[in-house]
Image: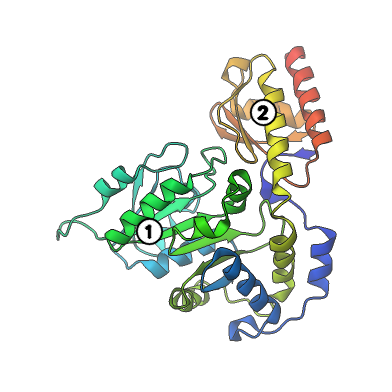
Amino acid sequence: MIDLRSDTVTKPTPAMRQAAFGAVVGDDVYEEDPTVLELEETAAQMLGKEAAMFVTSGTQGNQIAVLTHCRPGEEVILEAESHIYYYEGATISAFAGVQPRTIAGNRGAMDPQAIAAAIREDDIHQPETSLICLENTHNRAGGAVVPLENMQQIHKLAQERHISVHLDGARLFNAVVATGVDVKQFAACTDSVQICLSKGLGAPVGSLIAGSKTFIKKARKWRKRLGGGIRQAGIIAAPGLVALRTMVDRLVEDHANAKKLAEGLAEIKGLRIENMVETNMVMLHTKEAGMTAKEFVIMLKQQGILASAFNPYTVRLTTHFDVTSEEIDVVLKRVGKAMKQGV
């Protein structure tokens, strides 16, 4: 099977497996695991933040950030189809006790003026706005890059209104590679940032959140409360170090494969590409082909290709380092043949 469902399906590289095998470990709850400490220091330096903390997943990292920044009864502004709002089980309400206020974005980017209008006034009838959450790249916008200028404008507004900014940067390095903008510049627009190791970077598990030393100290207690205190965690942190040090620059290959895939699919009658392919995601519209997204995914599976039904007539295909350019050729050939045969 050629698996294009998500970049989360990547398998660890031989170097990652060897790093895990040889990792020097200690008790991370006591902050004594040298490999975890090295990973956290490396991430903090890369992102230009004072400190970082290893967490089990991107969702856990985002939730810890909200719990750290907010108090129950406050409000969080976020994009209407953001991962935190759409895919994290209403956890910001269930755990942090905060109310989400959504703003429809343009390719994942929120209008700073719309955010300014959404910030609550000092009124006993209204919750206080305590946090603005951004996402870059934006998943449901088809891997779109939120422009640095947009993030800078939002951060400036937030500073003026004394509101924190958190970035769900699960695929932030895809934005870095696509734009050539240094990751520190994106991170500078935030009070906290989460990056994922187990998507395009290919590590088997884990994410990191970064921010000030004060923020991370408070976040560490929330991680413990959520059951995220792992003991000899160096075994899973070691592949993360390999990911940060060796897997960022190669993301350009995934982007090239996604563009190649999109261009080839667009030439097949009945198929249309919905998104401007900037990174590693292709959003394919299937209605003109006479199939729903679910039906199209079933057809793909019959051809030895795995994909994700995203909307009633949208299929998402995601490239990653386990998919080669030659396999993209195979996908295009099989899809083209199946469409001609009316499968």
Q: Residues within 10 Å of mark 1 (few under 14, many from 20)?
A: some
* Image point (57%, 59%), residue name: 195
Residue 131 percent coordinates (x, y): 35, 59
Residue situated in front as seen by the camera: 252 or 6: 252
* Image point (82%, 29%), residue name: 330
Left or right of 17 in this view: 90: left
Residue 24's tag is none
What type is the residue that disc 1 sits on? Ser
* Image point (64%, 70%), residue name: 42
Residue 306 percent coordinates (x, y): 72, 36
Residue 84 percent coordinates (x, y): 46, 52
As helix, strand or loop, the secondary structure at mark 1 comes to helix
**Mark 2, residue position:** 262
As helix, strand or loop, the secondary structure at mark 2 comes to helix
* Image point (51%, 71%), residue name: 226
For the N terminus, the image quarter is top right
Mark in front: 1 vs 2: 2
Mark 1 vs 2: CB contact within 8 A: no
Residue 282, image quadrant = top right
Tell me if residue 7 comes above or below residue 214 in the rendering.
above
**Mark 1, residue position:** 93
